[in-house]
Image: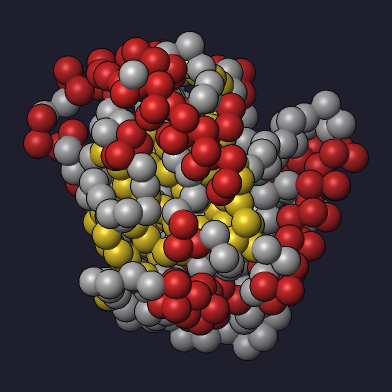
Amino acid sequence: PRSTLSSSSAASDVYKRQPLDMPMCGARSCGSQPKPPAETFTKPMPVPFVNQVTLENLRESYLTGMPMCFKSDGFISEEAARWDHDYLDEHYGDQSMAIAVKTPHVIERFGDLSANGTSQTVSQLIGSIRQEQLVRDASSCIKPGFGLDVHDKSATLSYCGHVMGAETGQPLYAHQNLMKIGDLAEEFPMPDIMASSWKEAMNLLWLGPSAPDLHQDPLDNVLYQIHGKKLVWVFPADATELFPLYSVFDTSAPNHCALGYGFRFPEVLKNYPDVATTQGYTVELGPGDALCIPSGALHAAMGSLDSISVNAFLVPNSVATLPSRGKYEWLRSGFAMFMSFVKAPTEESIDYDTSANSTTHEVLEARRERRAK
């Protein structure tokens, strides 16, 4: 999950000292003999799709660190499958959504945007999205990232700054823990098929297009696309060691890759040839699609303007079932958040409230019975 970064000037200065076109420690090749530049990026392959998802192939995806795509029929409730902007605006318009303004790459590229606010209501965000739809060509609005090519450095930075609200002060995407959006979490219970291996989930709602900020997470998760489209880049978990990550001393979000939005920029060919030639995967998700993203697997996503998705971070039934790479990342994240607290004790960090399978199923069934009456 995306954590926060200290907004202190000392922390901000750390990032400005390191130009993004220079190699950073954290990649496996740091300190070793420089490798010759890569001639071109390895073309991504489609994420493997399974027609019949089972507990066994879910576990295999997570244990091997390889992504997997499947249809979410039977995995999400009928109520959640019908979510759109009109529904969320009408029923949850006054609820708060968090804006990811303090991740390290945002600060590097655009400075501290927290002066514009770190949250918006659902209605405010949807209002900004609807205003954007009025000034853009209709065909671009339905494309992830307005059809952005992440190899185009200038266009990518312009897009990311725009959706972050760097100049306008009006971001076009935000997220929030479902447990903090009224009773919306009751409409998103954990699927029965997963209950034997994961006791609960931390579900994050994402609205709008997003900036493709490359990062990894310490928990296995499923990305469910509810409405609109989302293009996702994902790399195998065992390739993460090739990428430069932020230091635990610099940010409470060391799960972020130091390349950030620039994982496909031209300078990567020279400075990180191993990264450029790593076999990655892509998938364009539509309504009813789901993507397994293993813990430790670097990924980045950008959606269409009307995109609505949920990240379900899966909490294992015991620490023993957490993949070893996940245990290591929890230690890194925990230490980084401690260091961030020491630097800025008043800063808020991410909310880890989870929704338990049994509770949400019971509540959802009770709501259906009340509606039937």
Residue 77, compared with residue 72, is above or below; it is above
Residue 157 can be seen, yes or no = no
The image quarter containing residue 170 is top left
Residue 352 horizontal side relative to residue 182, left or right: right
> Residue 288: x and y, percent?
25, 50
Q: Residue at the spot x=53%, y=21% of the render?
A: 182
Residue 247 horizontal side relative to residue 210, left or right: right
> Residue 231: x and y, percent?
29, 53
Residue 121 horizontal side relative to residue 73, left or right: right
The image quarter containing residue 78 is top left
Residue 73 horizontal side relative to residue 96, left or right: left
Residues 36 and 246: in front is 246
> Residue 173: x and y, percent?
41, 31
Residues 311 and 106: in front is 311
- Indicate the quadrant containing the C terminus: top left, top right, bottom left or bottom right: top left
> Residue 136: x and y, percent?
16, 26
Figure coloring: secondary structure
The image quarter containing residue 114 is top right
Q: Residue at the spot x=17%, y=38% of the render?
A: 142
